[in-house]
Image: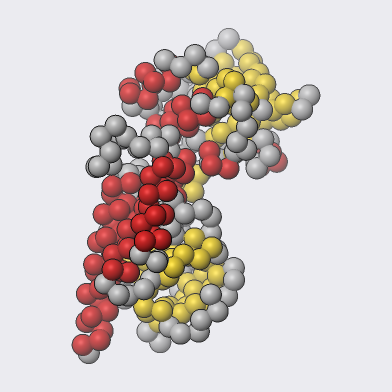
């Protein structure tokens, strides 16, 4: 980056909300800078099939949709930098963003930082995290014929299992409730696949390595049960991935933006939407923020 000029807009996060905001702003000449610590695409990188986003009657793979979004960013020459935003501070009418690379000043900031997975707090989870235990499907090594255990009963868990089944030898879905919490469509698809096996009333109690395999030890109504596998994927919910905004309790923000708390600071997408994590909602949030920013900056120029 290395440019000391004050930016008009910096967008933190390159998921659907950040992408849609950046394209709108670039089109009207504001030249936003998008900062992303991981890969462009956000949660779409985990998605097996996106079926409720307009324009794709038969659905589209999450990564395929990300590739289209990337093409659009490239078409409009949107500037995307890979770095982690560690802190945002506000002073003298500008925002200062401290990143893993340097410091950036901007008149406006959009926080489109998405969500992060919740830990299941299973003994052994932290020790094996990133080696045998994962919380994002995009982080698992892409190897053919491996065995997996997916821990969780919701839409994400079943979608992840279906996604993994394409390359897996076996996928076991385990959860402590008596019934899955996913939509019926995902349950039916999982049941139709020979290499997916579903285990309700199965509560994971520990994660450990045995004979160079991962052992997921569980309690069931019939006693203890072990699943020996290569990898475990935990899908037990997500929570907002807030950035530290100096002097403000940003995590308490509710509504379309926090402009009333701090002029020029906007929040878009999954980070504020709770369980309403849909690509269409995130895209709309990004557009709403971008249009609001255009008006905000115009008012500032007229003063």
Looking at the picture, tell me which residue is in the foreground, 37 or 258.
37
Indicate the quadrant where residue 251 lies.
bottom left
Q: Residue furthest front?
A: 75
Total labels drawn:
0
- Tell me if I can see residue 272 in this picture: no
Q: Is residue 111 above or below residue 157?
A: below
Which residue sits at x=65%, y=41%?
A: 129
Looking at the picture, tell me which residue is in the foreground, 222 or 137.
137
Which residue sits at x=55%, y=22%?
A: 171
Where is residue 286? Give x, y as percent.
31, 59
Indicate the quadrant where residue 147 lies.
top right
Q: Residue furthest bottom?
A: 303
Seen in the image, is 192 located left or right of residue 266?
A: right
Seen in the image, is 294 located left or right of residue 222?
A: left
Indicate the quadrant where residue 70 lies.
bottom left
Where is residue 211? Give x, y as percent.
78, 24
Looking at the picture, tell me which residue is in the foreground, 174 or 7.
7
Q: Quadrant of the C terminus?
A: bottom left
- Tell me if I can see residue 69 in this picture: yes
Q: Is residue 90 above or below residue 200?
A: below
Which residue sits at x=39%, y=54%?
A: 71
Q: Residue furthest right?
A: 211
Looking at the picture, tell me which residue is in the foreground, 239 or 302.
302
Which residue sits at x=52%, y=29%?
A: 164
Seen in the image, is 287 located left or right of residue 80?
A: left
Q: Is residue 242 above or below residue 233?
A: below
Render colour scheme: secondary structure
Where is residue 69? Give x, y as percent.
37, 52
């Amino acid at each position: 980056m290395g440019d000391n000029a004050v930016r008009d807009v910096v967008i933190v996060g390159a998921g659907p909300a950040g992408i849609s905001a950046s394209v709108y702003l670039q089109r009207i000449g504001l030249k936003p800078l998008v900062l992303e610590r991981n890969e462009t695409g956000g949660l779409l990188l985990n998605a097996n099939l996106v079926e409720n986003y307009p324009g794709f009657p038969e659905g589209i793979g999450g990564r395929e949709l990300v590739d289209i979004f990337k093409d659009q960013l490239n078409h409009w020459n949107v500037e995307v930098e890979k770095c982690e935003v560690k802190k945002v501070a506000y002073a003298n009418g500008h925002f200062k963003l401290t990143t893993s690379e340097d410091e950036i000043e901007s008149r406006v900031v959009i926080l489109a930082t998405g969500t992060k997975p919740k830990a299941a707090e299973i003994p052994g989870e932290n020790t094996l995290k990133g080696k045998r235990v994962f919380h994002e499907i995009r982080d698992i090594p892409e190897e053919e014929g491996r065995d997996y255990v997916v821990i969780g009963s919701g839409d994400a868990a079943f979608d992840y299992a279906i996604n993994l089944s394409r390359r897996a030898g076996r996928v076991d879905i385990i959860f402590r409730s008596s019934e899955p919490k996913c939509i019926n469509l995902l349950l039916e698809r999982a049941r139709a696949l020979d290499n997916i096996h579903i285990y309700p009333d199965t509560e994971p109690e520990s994660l450990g390595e045995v004979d160079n395999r991962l052992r997921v030890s569980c309690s069931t109504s019939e006693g203890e049960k072990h699943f020996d596998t290569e990898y475990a994927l935990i899908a037990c919910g997500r929570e907002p991935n807030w950035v530290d905004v100096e002097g403000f309790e940003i995590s308490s923000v509710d509504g379309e933006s926090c402009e009333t708390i701090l002029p020029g600071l906007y929040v878009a997408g999954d980070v504020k939407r709770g369980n309403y994590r849909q690509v269409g909602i995130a895209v709309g949030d990004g557009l709403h923020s971008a249009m609001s920013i255009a008006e905000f900056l115009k008012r500032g120029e007229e003063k």
